[in-house]
Structure formats: C-alpha cells, structure tokens
Image: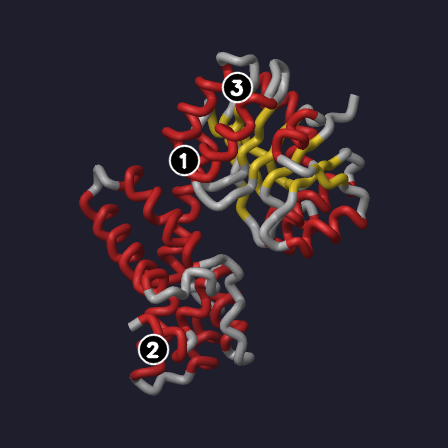
Amino acid sequence: MTKRIGFIGAGMMGSGICRSLLRAGYPVTVVAHRNRDPIEELVKLGATEAKSTTELAAGADVIMLCVDRAETVEAVIAGLAGGLRAGQYVIDITTGKPDTSTKLAASLKANGVTYVDAPVTGAPVHAAAGQLASMVGASPAVFETLKPVLDAYSTQALLFGSTGAGITAKLLNNFVTQSSCQIIMQAYRAARRNGVDWEKLYNTMLRGAARSGSLERIIGAALQGNYKGQQFSIANACKDIDYAGALVAADPDGARIQAAVLGALQRPVQAGLGDRFVSEMLDPEVERQAS
C-alpha cells in the first residue's frame, strides 16, 4: 500500500522534495508555509493542502519535516503530539542536532511512533529532480521500510547507523562544505586586493587539486557577475557550523577551524544579512555591509 505523506516545511528545498514524491505517485499533503507560492504550485501538481499540522498528521502514514533548525523540529513535534498515532513514521530531513534526534525518537517511541533522521545533501534543483543524497539514522528494518519513500527524491540513501547518525554525518559534510566555501572566498578576496586576475586563477584551480563543486558554483557564477551561485543561506550555514562545534570540539585544531568559520558567518548574520546566500559574502557590497 502506498504510504500517504504529510509534509511540513515545503520551502525552497522541501517543495522540490514534494515534487519528486508526487512524481513517484505518493499522495502528499502540505500545510501553509510563510511563502504561499510553493504551496500553490504543489497543489496544482496534485498535493492537498491541510489547514493545520494536526489535520495533516491525521491523514498521513509518514510525516516529513524539512524546517530550519533543531529547535523548530522540537516545537513542531510538540504541536503534533495530540495528533500522532501508533504506527506512524516521522522522517526528519532538517539539519538539526544528534542529541535532539535521540531525545525525540525516545519520546515518540513511547507512543508507538517511529522517528528517523534523514537529512539530505544537494541543491533545490536536485530535490526537484529526485537527485539528493539522504543520510539516514534508523534501525535496518525501518530503513528498508522507508527506503522507497527516500528513493523517490534521492539517488543515494545510505544508512549510517541508529538515530542521530544521519544528522551527525550531515553536520560533518556541512563542516567540510562551509569551511571550504569560506576558504575559497578568502582566496578570491585576497586575489582582488592583490590584483590577481580571477578568471586566470579560476582556470588554474580547475586544473588542480583546488577544484571542487563549491569553487565552480561560487567563482564560476561570480565571473559572470552573479554572486548567488551557492544557494544556501548564510543563516543556515551559520547554524550548521554552530551545531558541528560539538562534534569537533575534542580536537583543538578542529575547534579552531570551526570557530574561525563560525565567526566569518556570524558577522553577516548579525548585520541582518542571514537570508542572503553564502556566495554573496564575496559581493563587495555585502562584504561592506557585514564589516
């Protein structure tokens, strides 16, 4: 029997995941988002809109969350508490905290509800194309039960271990990605100050070990005058690096790297620029506003 999906958080990434679920034949119910555009588009594609998260949960076999942070996940789950029933699954796509996942899993299990952390890597375009990679924390049996759902929007879904393992893997992935983004932008700021031609430097890096997806998205776009190549908000990057701190704190070098990257991201957030994309930190005007 096809599982009915209730999706909370159909924003830039979540709406793409919903599109892939609908394309795979899953009945999807969504709930009002602060931006109604993706909700209305999904309804046109066949999704149903619920008036509340409680109504959404009542008609779902699987409730999926794709929100901004661990604290929001806790608030949403608390709001759903009266509407959940034994036998349901909660798939949390949010990049949150491992300890929050284990705590929620234990509390939901007491009511017969199974919680799974399954954050993803990829961009909104990959979500809509069903080309994300899912990192899953669950039991092997639960993973196999839910894998068809995950496969609807993922070209790779890997079980990393029990609850919290998926989010741990995602935070480590983002620690590498966001640290790399800052190093790339520092290098090109230095190039700007020292009169080094960006295009020549970029073409050189493409032919060596410095080549990366982040380099191509950030600098490849910037060379065309577009500072929005890395479509991930500064606020979310800041949150992820903050959460990753607990994972690298035991290593002094790791802690220093984390602190430096976090500091670089906190400055634009504190200047009210958290909704801008990470790659926009290379824009001289954004750099000026954040200083």
Query: Do the numbered discs 2 and 3 sit on residues whose CB atoms are within 8 Å?
Result: no
Q: Amino acid at mark 3?
A: Ser
The structure residue drawn at horizontal position 28% and vertical position 50%, both measured from the top left corner, is 258
Q: Amino acid at mark 1?
A: Thr
Identify the residue under disc 2: 288
- Dot 3: element: loop
How busy is the neighbourhood of tag 2: few (under 14 within 10 Å), some, or many (20 plus)? few
The structure residue drawn at horizontal position 47% and vertical position 58%, both measured from the top left corner, is 233
Left or right of 54? Residue 138 is left
Which sits in the foreground, 274 or 218?
Answer: 274
Q: Position of residue 23 (x, y in %)?
A: 78, 42
- Dot 1: element: helix
Q: Looking at the image, is 71 positioned above or below residue 236?
A: above
The answer to whether residue 267 is visible is yes
**Which is nearer the N-term, disc 2 or disc 1?**
1
Which sits in the foreground, 85 or 234?
Answer: 85
Which sits in the foreground, 77 or 285?
Answer: 77
Residue 169 occupies which quadrant of the picture?
Answer: top left
Identify the residue under disc 1: 168
How does the figure colour the protein chain or chains? secondary structure
Q: For the image shown, how many numbered marks are present on the structure? A: 3
Query: In front of the other: label 2 or label 3?
Result: 2
Q: Amino acid at mark 2?
A: Arg
Q: Looking at the image, is 97 positioned above or below residue 144?
A: below
